[in-house]
Image: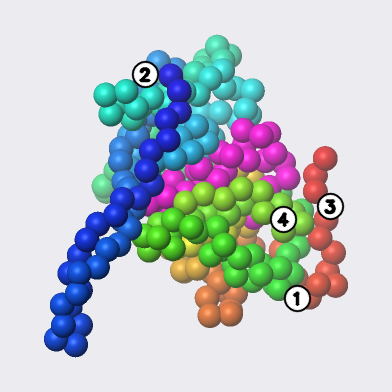
């Protein structure tokens, strides 16, 4: 199976009414389609996403789920759109398949939260596939805010459709490593992380900046990737803060020139004079 390019947006016409006048307009609408993810020969999850970066999406998604820890755990990732099936298949090494057997049986336990589950159960469930994030980096506020200001540069689809989310991964020295857009904020982060992961560069990744609010699922994905800090442009949920605090992650919101740090402010430097550690070897 091969990866086939699909449109990320389509053009649509609409009627605009303003000041007692009607005008026919056109607008790009972001594409949303299901992606069936198969792991180790069996269906695992179905996600609604914007087409593109399928292999990176699957890699990042499976890293977040705890199905893989290293790129070497993956034998192949393939994507097929024959008969509009939109199926992506990931094959694990025999050793990893045995290690992940319990997770495979549960089929998407992290990504598919059921109604009625409580916050305590979510934290305990996710904690089984997370380890505390190392505290190795201090970020000057100016560097963080500069990264936030760069976010629109990585949103070409948003400029067309006004309806996509973006995620950008930065290194310890605040160099951009990967970016992705999608109709879903979770998918955007999976894709961006997946790009870095498949290059075996997660050890150098440190910070993710997102165009959305921060939910606990995003914290879980960032934690599995070992990211020290997650920044959104909207405020996080209470459960996201609880989970970030439990794994020693810095969680912040950047809005109107302000940086609101909800946990992990030991990583926040007040000026450029604070040293930023070199990237890990």
Q: Are marks 2 and 3 in contact (CB under 8 Å)?
A: no
Residue 213: quadrant of the picture: bottom left
Graded by Cα atoms within 10 Å as few (under 14), some (14 to 19) or many (20 or more), the crowding at tag 4 reads: few
Residue identifier under label 3: 278
- The magenta-colored residue range is 182-207
- Residue at 70% x, 39% y is 201
Q: Quadrant of the C terminus?
A: top right
As rendered, which of 218 and 243 lies closer to the eye?
218
Q: Are marks 4 and 1 in contact (CB under 8 Å)?
A: no
Sequence order check, earlier mark of 2 and 3? 2
As rendered, which of 102 and 209 lies closer to the eye?
209
Percent position of residue 107, x then y: 37, 29
Q: Nearer the viewer, mark 2 or mark 4?
A: 4
The CA span between labels 3 and 1 is: 19 Å
Graded by Cα atoms within 10 Å as few (under 14), some (14 to 19) or many (20 or more), the crowding at tag 1 reads: few
Disc 4, SS: loop
Q: Nearer the viewer, mark 4 or mark 3?
A: 4
The CA span between labels 2 and 4 is: 38 Å
- Residue at 78% x, 75% y is 271
Q: Main secondary structure of the magenta part?
A: helix
Graded by Cα atoms within 10 Å as few (under 14), some (14 to 19) or many (20 or more), the crowding at tag 3 reads: few
Sequence order check, earlier mark of 2 and 4? 2
Residue 79 seen in the figure: yes
Q: Are marks 4 and 3 in contact (CB under 8 Å)?
A: no
| Disc number for residue 76 | none
The CA span between labels 4 and 1 is: 19 Å
The scheme the figure's colours follow is: rainbow
The reply, left or right, for residue 272 in relation to residue 82 is right
Q: Are marks 3 and 1 in contact (CB under 8 Å)?
A: no
Residue identifier under label 2: 42
Residue identifier under label 4: 175
């Amino acid at each position: 199976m091969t990866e086939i390019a699909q449109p990320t947006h389509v053009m649509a016409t609409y009627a605009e009414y303003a000041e007692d006048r009607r005008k026919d307009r056109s607008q790009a609408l972001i594409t949303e389609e299901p992606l069936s993810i198969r792991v180790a020969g069996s269906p695992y999850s179905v996600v609604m996403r914007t087409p593109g970066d399928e292999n990176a999406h699957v890699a990042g998604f499976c890293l977040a789920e705890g199905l893989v820890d290293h790129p070497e755990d993956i034998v192949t990732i393939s994507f097929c759109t024959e008969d509009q099936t939109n199926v992506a298949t990931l094959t694990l090494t025999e050793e990893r398949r045995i290690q992940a057997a319990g997770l495979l049986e549960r089929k998407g336990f992290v990504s598919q939260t059921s109604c009625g589950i409580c916050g305590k159960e979510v934290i305990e469930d996710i904690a089984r596939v997370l380890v505390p994030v190392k505290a190795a980096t201090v970020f000057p506020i100016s560097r963080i805010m500069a990264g936030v200001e760069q976010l629109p540069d990585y949103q070409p689809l948003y400029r067309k459709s006004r309806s996509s989310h973006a995620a950008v991964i930065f290194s310890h020295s605040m160099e951009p490593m990967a970016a992705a857009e999608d109709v879903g904020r979770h998918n955007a982060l999976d894709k961006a992380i997946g790009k870095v992961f498949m290059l075996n560069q997660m050890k150098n990744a440190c910070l993710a900046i997102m165009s959305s609010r921060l939910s606990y699922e995003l914290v879980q994905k960032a934690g599995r990737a070992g990211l020290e800090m997650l920044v959104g442009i909207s405020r996080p949920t209470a459960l996201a803060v609880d989970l970030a605090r439990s794994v020693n992650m810095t969680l912040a919101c950047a809005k109107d020139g302000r940086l609101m740090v909800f946990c992990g402010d030991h990583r926040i430097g007040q000026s450029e004079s604070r040293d930023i550690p070199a990237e890990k070897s």
